[in-house]
Amino acid sequence: MTNEIKFGLIFLFIGLAFIIQDIVSGSNWLENFETLFEFMNAIISITAAVFAWHVAKYFTIKTNNGTSWRWLAIAAILFAIAEILGVLRGVGIWYFGGIIDLLEFGFVVALARGFWEQKKTITDILMTFTQGVVKQ
């Protein structure tokens, strides 16, 4: 078993232990950190959205094959907006009703489309590679 799997299992069991302890004791101590986690998610998701946008731009300009990365960048941007709205809702500044759910739906659709486009790209590359190997 690799070290990554061992560490993953350790964190999984620690997380499950906290959840079980929380359910058994009836305590909602994690809710005290909800706003902090929303803020951290917003910062990380904004960073990921900027990074994804730059990667999409790079692949579009350099390789003319940035379709999948554009969709993944759109997904990251939608997720970042949803997280920002979640922070605003969490601190009580503004409540946006069902917009967050709509953004999350758009995120899932864009993410799925990005992965589908990436699969098409990888399949095309593999087909080109295997045809080139067979011809030689």
Image (spheres, rainbow, N blue to C red):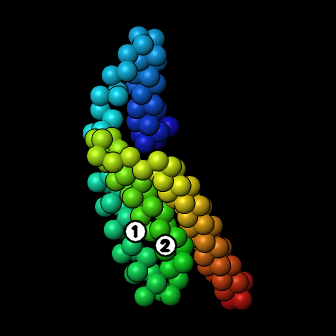
The image shows residue 23, relative to residue 13, as above or below, that is above
Q: Residue at x 43, y 76 (%)?
A: 56
Between 109 and 123, the one lying in front of the other is 109
Between 24 and 35, the one lying in front of the other is 35
Q: Residue at x 31, y 61 (%)?
A: 47
How many numbered circles are shown? 2
Q: Is residue 37 visible in this depiction of the protein?
A: no
Kindly identify the amino acid type of the residue bearing the numbered disc 1.
Ala
Asked if labels 1 and 2 touch by Cβ distance under 8 angstroms, the answer is yes
Q: Name the residue carrying label 2.
A: 69
Give percent across and percent down for residue 134.
Answer: 72, 83
Q: Indicate which disc residue 52 carries.
A: 1
Between 41 and 60, the one lying in front of the other is 41
What distance separates the C-alpha of mark 2 from that of mark 1?
7 Å
Give percent across and percent down for residue 85.
Answer: 37, 52
Can you tell which quarter of the image residue 119 is in?
bottom right
In screen coordinates, is 68 left or right of 44? right
Q: Residue at x 45, y 81 (%)?
A: 59
Give percent across and percent down for residue 69.
Answer: 49, 72
Q: Residue at x 37, y 64 (%)?
A: 49
Q: Earlier in the sequence, mark 2 or mark 1?
A: 1
The image shows residue 27, relative to residue 56, as above or below, that is above
The image shows residue 83, relative to residue 135, as above or below, that is above
Kindly identify the amino acid type of the residue bearing the numbered disc 2.
Trp
Give percent across and percent down for residue 63.
Answer: 48, 86
As helix, strand or loop, the secondary structure at mark 2 comes to helix
Can you tell which quarter of the image residue 91 is in?
top left
As helix, strand or loop, the secondary structure at mark 1 comes to helix
